[in-house]
Image (cartoon, rainbow, N blue to C red):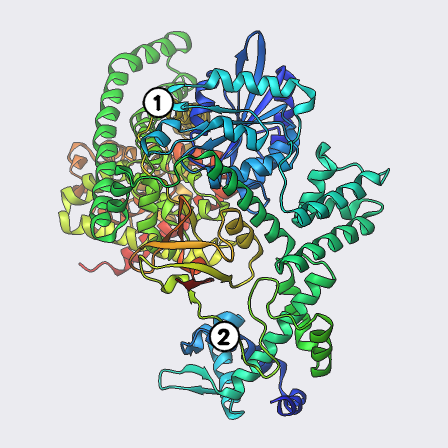
Amino acid sequence: MGPKRHSQEEVLDPSLDQSLEALYRLNQHGAAVPVKALAKKLRISRAEAAERVVRLQALGFVTSNAALDLTLTPSGAAWGAVRIRRHRLVERLLHDQLGLPWEQVHEEAARIAPAISFALEERLDAVLGHPVACPHGNPIPAPDGSVIVEPATPLDRLRPGSKGTIAAILQEEPQLLRYLAALGLFPKTELEVEEVAPLGGPIVVKVGASRYALGREVASRILIRET
Amino acid sequence: MALTCCQSVLQFKGEVQMTIALAGNPNVGKSSLFNRLTGMGVVTANYPGKTVDVNMGVTHFQDMVVGVIDLPGTYALEPVSEDQWVARQALLDGRPDAVISVVDATNMARNLYLTLQLLDLGLPVVVALNLMDEAERLGLAVDPVLLAKDLGVPVVPTVAVRGLGLDLVIAKAVETATSAESAGRRGLRYGRDVEEQIDALAAYLEAEEEVTPPFGLSPRATAILLLESDEEMLRWAEQQPQGAAILAEARSAAAEISERHGEPAPLRLTRERHGLAGAIAQAAQARGRARRSLQERVWHLTTAPLTGIPILLLMLLSLFAILFSVGNFLSDLLSGLWAAWASPPIQAALAWILGDGFFARSLVWGFDAGINAALAVGIPYVLTFYLLLSAFEDTGYLNAAAFLTDPLLHRVGLHGRAIIPLVAAAGCNVPAVMATRTLTTMRERVICATLICFVPCSARTAVIAGAVSRYLGWGPAIGLFVIVAAVGTAAGWGLNRVVPGRRTGLVMEMFPFRLPSFRNLLRRTWFRFKEFVFVAAPVVVSGSLLLGGLYESGLMWRLAAPLSPVTSWWLGLPAVTGLTLLFGILRKELALQLLVTLAMVQYGRGAGDLLHFMTMKQLFVYALVNALFIPCLATIAVLGRELAWRRTLLIALFNIVVALGVGGLVSRLWMG
């Protein structure tokens, strides 16, 4: 994979780069991604998103079904994984070496990571001691794009009665992370799903002796390893 | 409020001999404790731009006057949410002589997290181990002596709703405040390597001659906050002359911790604090697991969709029915009494002193009609609703309702908690606007308050009933409600996209049901009601004076002329209706009464039947505009109090534009 992506590095437009990274993030739990979701994530119009998708399809990175739901091809996934890998390596650099608070590194890294070359990426990985997770606990893909993940499910997909431990909290929104942590919701905490409100309503989880109702968008960012 | 919270806290400190702050998680009986301790003279202060209040009251211990600061209920003291920010700022600004940490004995592990954070800040702490009766009922045997030993601070078991243990808590707090050596904690340690980093950083800060930690914090407290990458503390460090060196030191200490534990230092500290809290809680608790209680089973009934939704509908319906029926009954009764007993002497007295001039008649408007208007809204609706709202809150049902309605309200940028104000608005908008205080961000409060103004209150419903269902039948009346509901939903949908601010995800603790204390209910209702009396009543009276002056001087009729393009041309209504809509601002149902009166003055007795001078279409448009149009004076007064005048003005303008827009549109589209 290494040499191939090295050559692609020169030709890929930054907007496509960004789109692949977004698709990779949206796609990482398996389900196909609607064009609408991609547009929303990148804050661009749906027409523009569709136009980028056409270009990505031409490059063989993306396939779509009749309903225009997108899936990354193996090469698209590998490419996306490299984006994520660089992003998370930069996060580690910012946090470990430069001491930026962990809730700030996501946005800083988003600015820096696109400028990282393959050579710099390798050097960064070596200097940081081949880290396997970003400061938020999310895995850093290996150089070949493969990710070693333990099976984890977003909390909003669990049914009442299921139990598990928090594996990671996705989407690095600083204040929310701190707020959840103060309540005792952080990686390695055990919890139980007690109730799921109908119509996309909140989810009640039991943590220790406390119960919390979490909105779906919050719950979807909490990854659970079921027990 | 002229003084900022910081100033009022400091001023309050100057008036008392000693200040004690109450800190605790939400719903642990902190306000019961506060209510039991303090008398009637409670002062409320808030920081500019924040929706969360700090209450201050006075208590007496032996011959000492002790000020009590009631902080907002929070889970932690980090500046990540409004309530936490306010609680922490009030603690740092106020530097209380002691802090009573109110801990829920049935959920010590989570509650002690905040206690440890208070201790980390170096504050002198006394623990009030509250809800001891409930812990006993659940079969939890908690040992306060062991807890005190582990925490290194005094622990007093209390049952705040019944006033048990409160004298002792105050005595211990005063003792802690006056003894020099008890400040800070003794012997509580986090993991050894974390402690090493804290100590090293604290020693570094102490060694720097020119560095003085802010807010009188200890070097240790400063070190912990820096390791947690507390934004405010990082800003402070940056401003120091040797800021770069301090930050570098903090960074290397944090890096050390994160390398050792494979997670960022702030998260590690949070984990250690939770771990310590859990260990202390477990040691002090003889029996580990609570029995599944009756409350818990009832709780499940109210949140499981199958039983919860019918219960919710029933609760909302009864809330509405009580507010509507009791409110209307009291309102009629009070207005009747006023007309029979207060109104004649006031009018007579004014006539006797000032004669029958313009001045006297204007004053009658203000002091007779104005006070009557405040009375007709205040006691019947505001008082009734507050009693109901307090009961909903104190039992914990509010959270169950919020849980079930969250997905629907989410679409208009609100959370489930907004359901109560929105339903209450159908009774009266005034208490509904005041109830938006249960929402946590200004964005949600603005959206909710705007939508409340679109909900027809009982007075507007009376106009709809009197004008539309009486003359046009039930069908059009229901149609009118459907239009109003559609307009409200569309407004919410639009506001959600326009109103600035971050949408916060829902994270809400679900409390077990609790029997509320009646005394607390009454006291809380009274405090809220008092605010209505002092804030809204003067606005209503002065607004009435103004309207009266305009009417009596005849200026009102001249105002009618510029209005006529709007009323006659755009809405297609008789010119006289424009004036009555303006008077509707005083009280919405007045619009219809005045319409009938004015019509009779202008067109003779026969106009008492409105259809003699208005078509069905005109009646419908009239009732619709009255329903959507600018809220009444009392509502405007509380909007101004709750959201500041600039937002109130915007909401009122928005209402007028929407009302005229929809009214004109219906007038144009009406067939037949």
Residue B577 image position (x, y, % from top left): 30, 41
- The amino acid marked with disc number 1 is Leu
Quarter of the image with the C terminus of chain B is bottom left
Q: Residue furthest right?
A: B209
Query: To which chain does the residue with label 1 belong?
Result: B
Residue type at mark 2 is: Ser
**Quarter occupied by residue B153:** top right
Identify residue for label 1.
Answer: B522
Q: Secondary structure at mark 2?
A: loop
Q: Residue at x 62, y 87 (%)?
A: A12
Task: Measure the alpha-carbon separation of dots 2 and 1.
Answer: 54 Å
Mark seen at residue B535: none
Q: Is residue B230 above or below residue B543?
A: below
Q: Position of residue B197 (x, y in %)?
A: 72, 48
Give the x, y percent position of residue B136.
35, 29
Quarter occupied by the N terminus of chain B: top right
Say left or right for B477 vs A201.
left
Q: Which residue is mark 2?
A: A45
**Front residue of A90 and B655:** A90
